[in-house]
Amino acid sequence: MTAYSIAGLVGVMLVWAPISFAATPPPDSLVARQQAENLAKLPPLVPHGGIDHSGRKQKGRASFYAHHFTDRKMADGSRFHPNSDAAASKSLPLGTVARVTNQQNGKTAVVQVEDRGPHVGVRVLDVAPKVADHLDMKRAGVTQVVVAPIAVPQPNGTVKLGAGAAESNPQEVTIATKRAQAAAH
């Protein structure tokens, strides 16, 4: 490699490095909070396959895990416990912390995506029975929900605030960010 190509490569790295780091501002920054507020203003999406790192709200139907899944291994390697805040999503990254709102009654619960699924139809989320109780959805079994990510692990190891962060208090955002960071590492 010549001195000119090395200098050119270093120049490109210096120009692009700040841009790549700026793509995901630190979760405790004003820029991250503003991005979350902008995401919160957008309408919820219906997921259409693939993992979505955007932090946008999603909408669809949710169900809950049956008790016979107790102690089974989930996609993140942990064991399922019915009294946890675990959730399964086909489209949110593992480790995502999100607020789920039951559209029938307005009740909410915070979950962490630890598994892949649901594997039934067009459902967007499976939740632990404890969460289903909080959402008051056990009788119906399946209900319409909006899933608002609070903290979303990114492919580069950082955590991005999602739409749900704009609707959460600073303490909730800090806890969600720490949980998502722990899951990402």
Image: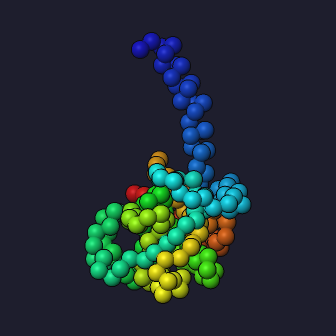
70 displayed left or right of 36: left
Residue 22: % across, % down? 61, 44
Q: Nearest the camera: 66 or 9? A: 66
Q: Is residue 158 visible?
A: no
68 displayed left or right of 13: left
Q: Is residue 79 above or below residue 21?
A: below
Q: Residue at x 56, y 36 (%)?
A: 17
Q: Nearest the camera: 153 or 141? A: 141
Q: Quadrant of the C terminus?
A: bottom left
Q: Quadrant of residue 11?
A: top right
Q: Quadrant of residue 21?
A: top right
Q: Is residue 81 above or below residue 176?
A: below
Q: Residue at x 58, y 33 (%)?
A: 16
Residue 96: % across, % down? 49, 63
Q: Residue at x 49, y 77 (%)?
A: 142
Total number of numbered labels? Answer: 0
20 displayed left or right of 156: right
Q: Is residue 23 visible?
A: yes
Residue 69: % across, % down? 30, 76
Residue 101: % across, % down? 59, 75
Q: Is residue 144 above or below residue 135?
A: above
Q: Residue at x 45, y 12 (%)?
A: 2
Q: Residue furthest front?
A: 121
Q: Is residue 96 above or below residue 126?
A: above
Q: Quadrant of the N terminus?
A: top left
User: Which color mode does the image show?
Assistant: rainbow
